[in-house]
Amino acid sequence: MGPLFTQGIISTEVNHILAFFIGIGFGFLLEAAGFTNTRKLAGVFYGYDMTVLKVFFTAALTAAAGLLILHTLGAIDLHMTYYPKTYWLPTLVGGLLMALGFLTGGFCPGTSFCAATTGKIDAMVFVGGIFLGIFGYAFTYEPIFEKFRNSYGLGRVNVADWIGIPQGLFILLMVIIAIVSFLVADKVQKKINAKQSKEDLHDLGLDE
Amino acid sequence: MDKGRKYMNPYLAGFLLGLLVIIAYYFSGEGLGASGAYKRIVIGTVDLVAHNYAKNAHYFAKVVNGEHSPFNAWLVFELLGMMVGAIISAVIYNRMHLEIGKSPKITNKTRLWFALLGGILWGIGSQLGRGCTSGLVMSGMAVNALSGYIGLVAVFGGGYLFAYLFRKLWT
């Protein structure tokens, strides 16, 4: 039964080798999906390229549904895995900073790393910015951030429990919301791109 | 044929990414992440240069005083793998070039300054928010964690909220 490493079934060395191979898959898929192309990423906020929405929702909900099924079958115990605690206000404020970072920088940490690796100069600068930001945060952590970061803590909160519905029903509702959003996204993208130039569409990989 | 801009079907890419998250949880009990690996690299670097500072400063202490080197972490090995995976895909699809990605309507200089600013905002935001798009939102949503959904609303909702202000950079 999983998680294997947490229960000592595989060693730290094997676990780290697996991390490397899982990383290969992760990097490959981000690149293959087009996430090293900064305009494709930013497009989700302007409607001209909704790829991010499709990839992201599909990934998160495939994982959620799969893990719930495995947990229910007793194949994995989700009480033993990474399960982030909720600090709602710091995460909300941090998330808004990240949103502004997305709109100005056109990447996130994972996508910029893949883009920088494959030769995108803007992504290399972006990655440099991430390190600058973390260094700045780290050196001013105690006077500025520490108290706030550890405030508004709710512990390990499950979103379905928090709403008061079963886990499976919550995921089903999210899948329905996702499918509707994909249909709307396709309509919006089609409408906006009717006015885009051929070169633009080619650059986004959206031409037929 | 110009293969440079042919991308994988988004639903297939998302499905495979979801399977990868399941594999990471099943074998390692970990979610996929990126900003956590950057954090480890920063902590490890400061520890190398100034160990006495790092072992007492609150941001660094917990990792520095741990059992293993700050670099010897699951997320760091995953990040190294990402490098290899991205290169494999870029070579297969003929996208391995030095270039600046941007809207044709802005200059390279503008693009690079805003890229730097965006990176800084992500650096701070991911530390305050406890993770980025992968570790906080995707891996959080994978286990129905409330924090993942707060991250989703903040990062993507915030993106739509402020998008108008930055439209000249992209459209």
Image (cartoon, rainbow, N blue to C red):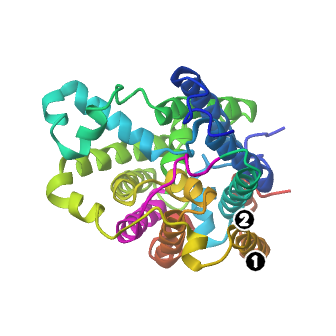
Residue furthest to the top in view is: A13
Q: In the image shown, does B139 or B1 lie closer to the viewer?
A: B139
Q: Is residue A168 visible?
A: yes
* Residue B127: image location, x then y, percent: 35, 53
Going 57% across and 44% down the picture, which residue do you hit? Answer: B32
Instruction: Kindly identify which chain the residue marked by label 1 belongs to.
Output: A
**Which amino acid is tagged 1?**
Val
* Residue A119: image location, x then y, percent: 55, 35
Quick one: quadrant of the C terminus of chain B?
bottom right
Q: In the image shown, does B51 or A168 lie closer to the viewer?
A: A168
Instruction: Kindly identify which chain the residue marked by label 2 belongs to.
Output: A
Instruction: Give the answer, above or below, for where A60 lies relative to B28.
Output: below
Magenta-tinted stretch: A77-105
Instruction: Give the answer, above or below, for where B170 lies relative to A7.
Output: below
- On residue A197, which mark appears? 2
| Residue A5 drawn in magenta | no
* Residue A123: image location, x then y, percent: 48, 44
Q: Which residue is mark 1?
A: A184
Secondary structure beneath disc 2? loop
**Which amino acid is tagged 2?**
Ser
Going 39% across and 60% down the picture, which residue do you hit? Answer: B129
Left or right position of A89 against B101: left
| Residue A87 drawn in magenta | yes
Secondary structure beneath disc 1? helix
Gap in Å between the C-alphas at discs 1 and 2?
22 Å
Going 49% across and 66% down the picture, which residue do you hit? Answer: A157
